[in-house]
Image (cartoon, rainbow, N blue to C red):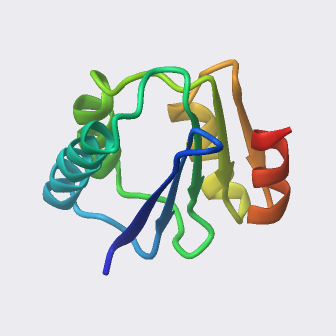
């Protein structure tokens, strides 16, 4: 399994956990799957998002390009918490994800607490 996705309706929270590095083709399939699930859960813009990337390192450049291309039309969150470990992976997230409502965390518990506060 490359990732887990769950929707917490009461908190309006989309929780994603990545388990490994993605290829560019897998990134396209991932974004299509998450969008399908997002619509099926009847989520709307303004939701809160946590992506736990702590189990994998930096993504390859072609994967980043594919993620950016396929995620562009995705509905916007009100807050984004990214769990990321390691200086290179953190720098990569900061470079690619420039939303002012995004924060980086070392652990999922702290990220979740900030999101639902």
Vertical comparison of 15 with 41: above or below? below
Instruction: Give x and y (percent) for residue 69.
Output: 24, 30
Residue at 33% across / 74% down in the picture?
2
Vertical comparison of 89 with 107: above or below? above
One can see residue 18 in this view: yes
Residue at 67% across / 59% down in the picture?
84
Instruction: Give x and y (percent) for residue 36.
Output: 20, 44
Quarter of the view holding residue 32:
top left
Residue at 21% across / 52% down in the picture?
33
Vertical comparison of 10 with 53: above or below? above
Q: Could you tell me which quadrant the C terminus lies in? A: top right
The answer to whether residue 86 is left or right of residue 8 is right
Q: Could you tell me which quadrant the N terminus lies in? A: bottom left
The answer to whether residue 102 is left or right of residue 26 is right
Q: Which residue lies furthest to the front in this view?
A: 10
The answer to whether residue 40 is left or right of residue 87 is left
Q: How many marks?
A: 0
Q: Which is nearer the eye, 107 or 56?
A: 107
């Amino acid at each position: 399994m490359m990732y887990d996705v769950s929707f917490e309706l009461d908190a309006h929270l989309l929780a994603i956990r990545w388990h490994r590095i993605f290829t560019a083709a897998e990134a396209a399939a991932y974004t299509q799957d998450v969008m399908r699930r997002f619509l099926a859960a009847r989520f709307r813009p303004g939701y809160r998002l946590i992506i736990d990337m702590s189990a994998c390192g930096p993504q390859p450049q072609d994967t980043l390009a594919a993620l950016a291309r396929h995620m562009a039309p995705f509905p916007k969150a009100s807050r984004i918490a990214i769990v990321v470990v390691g200086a290179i992976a953190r720098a990569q997230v900061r470079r690619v994800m420039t939303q002012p409502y995004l924060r980086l965390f070392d652990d999922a518990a702290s990220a979740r607490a900030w999101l639902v506060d």
